[in-house]
Image (cartoon, grey):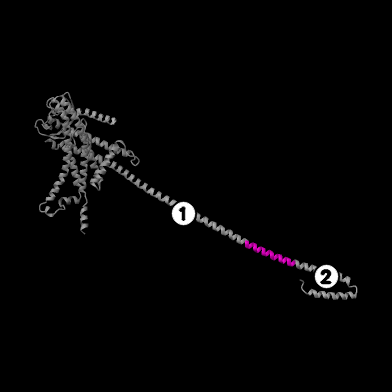
Amino acid sequence: MSLITPDFGLLFWMTLIFAIVFFILARFGFPLITGMVKKRSDRIEKSLRDAEEAQKTLKQLAEEHKRMIEEARKEQARILNEAATAGDKIVQEAKEQAREQTAAMIEKAREEIRIEQETARREIAGEVATLSVEVAEKLIRGHLDSDQRQNALIDKLIEEARAAHKPVS
Amino acid sequence: MPRIGKRYGWIVAVLLLLAPAAASASGHEASAPGELDMRSYIFGHIGDAYEWHITTINGHHISIPLPCIVIDGGLHVFLSSLMEDHGYTCNENGKLVNAATGKRPVDLSITKNVCSLILSSILLVVLILLTARWYRRHDPMKEAPRGLAGLMEMLITMVTDDIIKEGVGKDYEKYAPYLLTAFFFIFLNNLLGIVPFFPGGANLTGNIAVTLFLAVCTFLAVNLFGNKHYYKDIFWPDVPTWLKVPLPLMPLIEIIGIFTKPFSLMVRLFANILAGHIMLLGVVAVIFVTAKLGPAINGSMSIIAVLFGVFMDILELLVAFIQAYVFTMLSSVFIGLSRQEPEHEHKQIETTK
């Protein structure tokens, strides 16, 4: 039967044409297409992986950020606390110092006042002594016009001198 | 719903218009008007011819004469319509013979099948190169193809990922061009075979010469690149020694197996497509066979034949795809088997340790 006996002519042309078609398609057709499709699918896969990674990184960053804010807040609180304590301390110290200085100044002033008083008293005492001598001289001149009176005066002076040796209260 | 109904109605209407076209192409070798010569009707369609018959109007054949190329003590090239003038005629099998001696010369004629082969090959190359051109013109990293390139990409990706990668395994890229070419060649020619008018209608993938060639290609791809393990399994398989020596029973069976695999590929494609064509022709023939039995029977049988023909056409569309798929898949699996690494032997050694 001609149906199941391969015809030589058709076989010849089939070989020739299929070889040409195969050559053209294998050279210019399929590798290009499959290569591009593979490249694209690779790229899509890579993009998906990258996106996932980016998301992960983003999440990590957000966590880091959160953690940093938390830390900064803590640090801030600590610093504020420290500053408050330090301020208190400084004020305290300043007050203490001021008090000490004031006390010292007052003490010094007192001392000076005492010395001044002493000096003034001495001057006054000197002055009074001079005045007394002068007054006494004048008085003595008036009372010593007779021997009698002179004797009386000598007695009296001696008496007074005796009394003067005793400390004045 | 009415919209869908309308669409189906349209398809049916088109097929009804096409059916007579397919049918009218049948009568060109009818022995007498009104009488259907079943043998010449069927074999005229599934066989080869030196002219491409298009239709017959009022007993007048309209066909495209094709060039005959004959080597018979020198090269003779002439149109099939002028065959008689060059001293050649057709024998009872429809083959070209020398009119004087009755012997068959070396016949390289561009027959109907060769013509169809040329046209479909040009179409195939254009389709694939247009798709390839899209990739060259666009940046596929930025956009996906649409239209023709999108369709072809879908098919190519499906064949590559589902058939070739699965079947061949490692280094499948080396075989992908051949397997893809075979798939698209078979698929396109199967589809063109269903189209009832020019340039379709030739029974190319249902021709034994074509399927023989494709099977030989797979045979070469399997056996030329088979690895050491593959050949060891053929000549010294893992079976009890008495099966190999002194009578090489298993090697003999394995060697027969080398040839039965591509042989089954050849016969499967050939028989499936041939059977599909004969069934379709038979269904259409019902209309003409019942013509003598009166208008009532003829009319009702025509309606049944058309409905059944629509069903068969749709089935053939499915078969066109399935046969291309199966041929490619089995070729991939055979290639994959010839390149299998001896994994199980290592495992056996490991388990015995």
Query: Helix, strand, or loop for circle 2?
Result: helix
Q: Image quarter for residue B330?
A: top left
The crowd level at tag 1 (other Cα within 10 Å; few <14, some 14-19, many 20+) is: few
B104 vs B285, nearest the viewer: B285
| Residue at x 46%, y 52% (from the top left corner) | A69
Determine which of the numbered discs, if any, sits on residue A99 in the image: none
Q: What range of the chain is rendered magenta?
A: A99-119
- Main SS, magenta residues: helix
Q: Which mark is residue A71?
A: 1
Report the residue marked by disc 2: A133
The disc, 2 or 1, on the residue closer to the chain's N-terminal end is: 1
Is A106 in the magenta? Answer: yes
Residue B78, quarter of picture: top left
Mark 2 belongs to which subunit? A
Image quarter of the N terminus of chain B: top left
What residue is rendered at 12% in x and 49% in y?
Answer: B252
Q: Secondary structure at mark 1?
A: helix
Whether marks 2 and 1 lie on the same chain: yes
Residue B293 placement (x, y as % from top left): 13, 25
Is residue B64 visible in this depiction of the protein? no
Residue B289 vs residue A103, the one in the foreground: A103
In the rendered image, the residue lying farthest to the top is B58
Percent position of residue B336, x then y: 21, 47
Q: Is residue A84 magenta?
A: no
